[in-house]
Amino acid sequence: MSKKPAFKHINRREFVRAAAAAGGLAFVTACGDEILGIKGDDLALGKKGGKPGGGKGGPVDRYPLNVPSVHEFPGELTLNCAPARVDLGGEQMSDVWAYNGSFPGPTLRAARGDRVNVILQNNLLDETITHWHGMVVDHLNDGHPMHAIQPGAGPRLYDFSINQRAALNWYHPHPHELTGEQVNLGLAGAFIIEDSEEAQLNLPTGAYEVPLIIRDAKLDRSGNLTYTAKRGGFSGDTFLVNGTLNPRLEVDRTLYRFRILNGSNARIYRLALDSGHPWLLIGNDGGLLANAVGGASVAQIDLSPAERLDILIDFRGLNTGDKVMLQDLNAGWDLLEFEVTGAISNPAASFVDGQALSAIDPLVQNGATRTFSFDGMSRINGQQYEMDRIDERVPVDSVEKWIFTTNGNAPHPVHVHAAPFQVISRTGGRNEVFPWERGWKDTVLLEDGETVEVLVYFRKEDYLVDGVVPANSIYLMHCHKLEHEDMGMMMNWELYDPSA
Ligand code: C2O
Ligand code: CU
Ligand code: CU
């Protein structure tokens, strides 16, 4: 980092606390110096309204989609969190916070069985810690806020082995009450896990496997990312895909695999292709689905913060010059334009609706049933998060039923750290489990009036260090609307070994 932009330090944490306590609002620009009070949580999620450059109503300048560089494990990787200046498209340079100067951070890849060694350095102005969202690892490697490192202090070392199925996971900061700001200002990246089951399918790879991190954003007058928190959730007036404004991607006439992450703090997308161009849904948070799903039931897919999708789009039937738009029907945003430019090339394999992809054994409950009410915007079961309070104790090797309900102020995308689950039912509200919620998940969307039941698997071997479940194996469950999380809609659960 030769030239660091001058960031004015604002004590973000004080605003979070004030907002949570007073029921007021904190409206803060993190890179700038304005502090404004505003009234009312008027920005309902998922409603039409925003009018970004990429909206309807005329051609916009489109910029080539950024595809972050790839780092493959095993081996050691230094991740440095620091301010950076990046090109969001059109050579417009913007201040962000980034991992290794890359926005989004480098795409990490590892195969099942690989060992991951990461040296995390903090050159921000606040403490930070990185969490591997979707990764099932022992407590010391999970990136719990209790392990945050101070700016300029020694690094945090991560050392874990990948022992889970192929999936698109991701990494992002998780410091107490500061997660929303740090993610919003740019700290997030994809972490792709491969395994042999998936390899047998011959899915598109290389240039034909493209991660898409979709998020909304606010730019200040100088074009820098700026964070304006609201209790109801951050709402940006524009969007970025892989850190690119109004992106376009030139595609060959072949089959593509898109690994999609909703990297927004709070926004829910309803994704679709324009003109009804078909796609095939093959996976989600927890990797491949049992069967591919095409047709009307997946023509529009709702994706809440931290959820992922694995999608195949076949451009073979199109002609050079044809365009297909990935859209968000909620905001009316044209997210990404595909333009067919390349030659025809035959994909490695073909895929059809209903095709078997992966063996998924349905979980069978053998442990407790617990109910969690997501109350207001800052509490679970009536309580705000406290770092050193253990809220639940969970025995390893159990499959528990966790029931999520809400008392208003939804949507709440509910996320469980380090323990994958299967969605069993949704009653009330939308009243169904959608095709993209089958298989394995780590985040599920809870709307008002809904009760969602999941079965969570706490597989003992995933948490062992030197053959035992360590003391203080403490993990999180929280709302992944990051403003709710920062205000306290989060709880600690602790694993223990009943046989020890
Ligand atoms: Cu993606 Cu606890 O977070
Ligand atoms: Cu997580
Ligand atoms: Cu919430």
Image (cartoon, grey):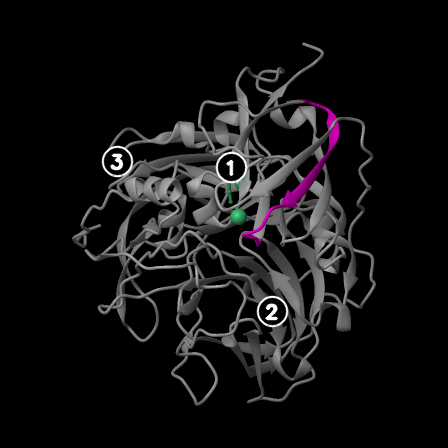
Q: Nearer the viewer, mark 2 or mark 3?
A: 2
As measured in the structure, the alpha-carbon distance from the residue carrying label 3 to the one carrying label 1 is: 25 Å
Q: Residue tagged by mark 2?
A: 271
| Stretch in magenta | 395-411
Asked which secondary structure carries label 2, the reply is strand
Vertical comparison of 50 with 153: above or below: below
Q: CA distance from mark 2 to mark 3?
A: 38 Å
Location of residue 449 in the rendering, given as x and y in whole percent from the top left corner: 67, 53
- Report helix, strand or loop for mark 1: strand
Q: Quadrant of residue 363?
A: top right
Nearer the observer: mark 3 or 1; the answer is 1
At mark 3, the secondary structure is loop
Circle nearer the N terminus (2, 3): 3
Q: Residues within 10 Å of mark 1 (few under 14, many from 20)?
A: many
Tell me if the residue at label 1 has its CB under 8 Å from ligand 1. yes
In the foreground, 148 or 405: 405
Left/right placement of residue 295 relative to residue 265 reads right
- Is the C-beta separation of discs 2 and 3 under 8 Å? no
Reading the image, the residue beneath label 1 is: 490
Question: Does residue 1 appear left or right of residue 429 in this picture?
Answer: left
378 displayed left or right of 101:
right
Spot the residue most to the top: 500
Give the answer, above or below, for where 127 lies relative to 57.
above
Q: Position of residue 226 (x, y in %)?
A: 30, 59
Q: From the image, tell me which residue sits under label 3.
A: 151
Disc 1, disc 2: CB below 8 Å?
no
Identify the amino acid type marked 2: Leu
Image position of 295 with respect to 210: above or below:
below
Along the viewing direction, whichever of 427 and 198 lies nearer the viewer: 427
| Residue beneath the point at 71% across and 33% down | 457
Q: Which mark is residue 226?
A: none
